[in-house]
Amino acid sequence: MKPKALITGAAGMLGKDMAKALEEAFEVIAMSKKRLDITDYTQVQKSFTSIAPEAVINCAAFTKVDLCEDQSQVAFDVNAKGPENLAKACKKLNIKLIHISTDYVFDGTATTPCREDHPPNPINVYGRSKLQGENYITQTCPNHLIVRTSWLFGKEGPNFIKTMLELSKTRESLQVVNDQMGRPTYTKDLSMAVLLLLKNNAQGIVHFANSGCCTWYDLCCYALKKAGRNKVNVEPISSDRFKRPAKRPKYSVLNLERFEKITGQRPRPWQEAVDSFLIEIGEYAG
Ligand SMILES: NC(=O)c1ccc[n+]([C@@H]2O[C@H](COP(=O)([O-])OP(=O)(O)OC[C@H]3O[C@@H](n4cnc5c(N)ncnc54)[C@H](OP(=O)(O)O)[C@@H]3O)[C@@H](O)[C@H]2O)c1
């Protein structure tokens, strides 16, 4: 009999791919917000007690970075209080807690890839709420794994690449910021990485993203080219020209060495991951 893994936020972009990936080694119990609201401690404790999973993988979050600025109470409830509830219940019931966090815990002033021990200093509400969630977990539940990742794209939810593909259908030109540097990450690769980390009994904080790095402009150009949308003119612009409610870090490239050391595997380059994604959604033109 396979051990049980309970996934929270299972209807989200990552949650859906995570559920599929973990089926290889676990009996997966996928719980969407409707079935389990992580901000409700009583519900969390009841579910964990009756299901008795070996591991809980938290894919639930309030991920709308700009909305977080105006809705900071919701952001802190879901991204900080939620993980605290999970950590308390996991500690009490002796369950391993795997939590997904973000490169936005960093302020973007680094000039080389950020290691797990690089001092966090978030510059927006989303990042601050996610960092508080991390801190609650490290303080409350010793048996934890926090996987920080960045710039997610996957079939199951809205994301930057899908938006650019959609816009390219109706627009002749697009303006995309070219002064934020990060590592795009395919949700399928991240889900397999979590499975691998679980198999290796990884603990603490681990960074995972696809390898290489780029700007949003680079990512847009690459994805549109590979999807055969060659007629669209993509113009690089600075963040100053694309004002948004939440500030973004200029450089949030995650260092992947700890992941490589634990698993013996190097994440594949983001370009290969984008190709696979485009194939998965039927948009790959070669
Ligand atoms: N997307 C990115 O670029 C990115 C980058 C770095 C890190 N991450 C992290 O990766 C993880 C997965 O992100 P994602 O892109 O898959 O996000 P997503 O598609 O927005 O999925 C998050 C899910 O959590 C659910 N949720 C919200 N509040 C909840 C609550 N109180 N209880 C239970 N579930 C709740 C959401 O449901 P509703 O939609 O119904 O509210 C949604 O289904 C998150 O921890 C995020 O912080 C994401």
Image: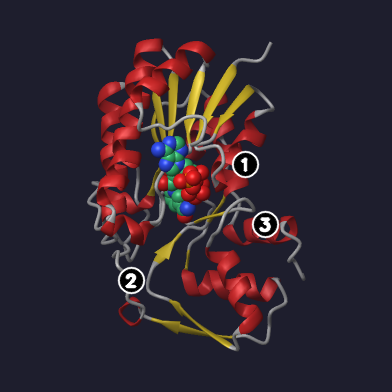
Residue holding disc 1: 17
Q: Is residue 184 visible?
A: yes
Residue holding disc 3: 277
- Residue 267 in the image, given as x and y percentages of width and height: 57, 47
Q: CA distance from mark 3 to mark 1?
A: 12 Å
Q: Earlier in the sequence, mark 3 or mark 1?
A: 1
The residue drawn where x is 31% and y is 55% is 68
Q: CA distance from mark 1 to mark 2?
A: 29 Å
**Residue flagged by tag 3: what amino acid is it?**
Phe
Q: Earlier in the sequence, mark 2 or mark 3?
A: 2
Q: Is residue 4 left or right of residue 36?
A: right
Q: Residue 226 versus residue 10: which sits nearer the camera?
A: 10
The residue drawn where x is 62% and y is 62% is 271
Question: Dot 3: what SS?
Answer: helix
- Residue 279 in the image, given as x and y percentages of width and height: 74, 59
Question: Dot 2: what SS?
Answer: loop
Q: Earlier in the sequence, mark 1 or mark 2?
A: 1
Instruction: Specify whether tag 2 is near ligand 1 (CB below 8 Å).
Output: no
Q: CA distance from mark 2 to mark 3?
A: 27 Å
**Residue flagged by tag 2: what amino acid is it?**
Arg
Q: Is residue 123 left or right of residue 92?
A: left
In which quadrant will I find the N terminus? Answer: top right
Q: Residue 157 versus residue 140: which sits nearer the camera?
A: 157
**Residue flagged by tag 1: what amino acid is it?**
Asp
- Residue 142 in the image, given as x and y percentages of width and height: 33, 20
Question: Dot 1: what SS?
Answer: helix
Depth-wise, is mark 2 or mark 3 nearer the camera? 2
- Residue 201 in the image, given as x and y percentages of width and height: 49, 22
The residue drawn where x is 35% and y is 45% is 115
Residue holding disc 2: 244
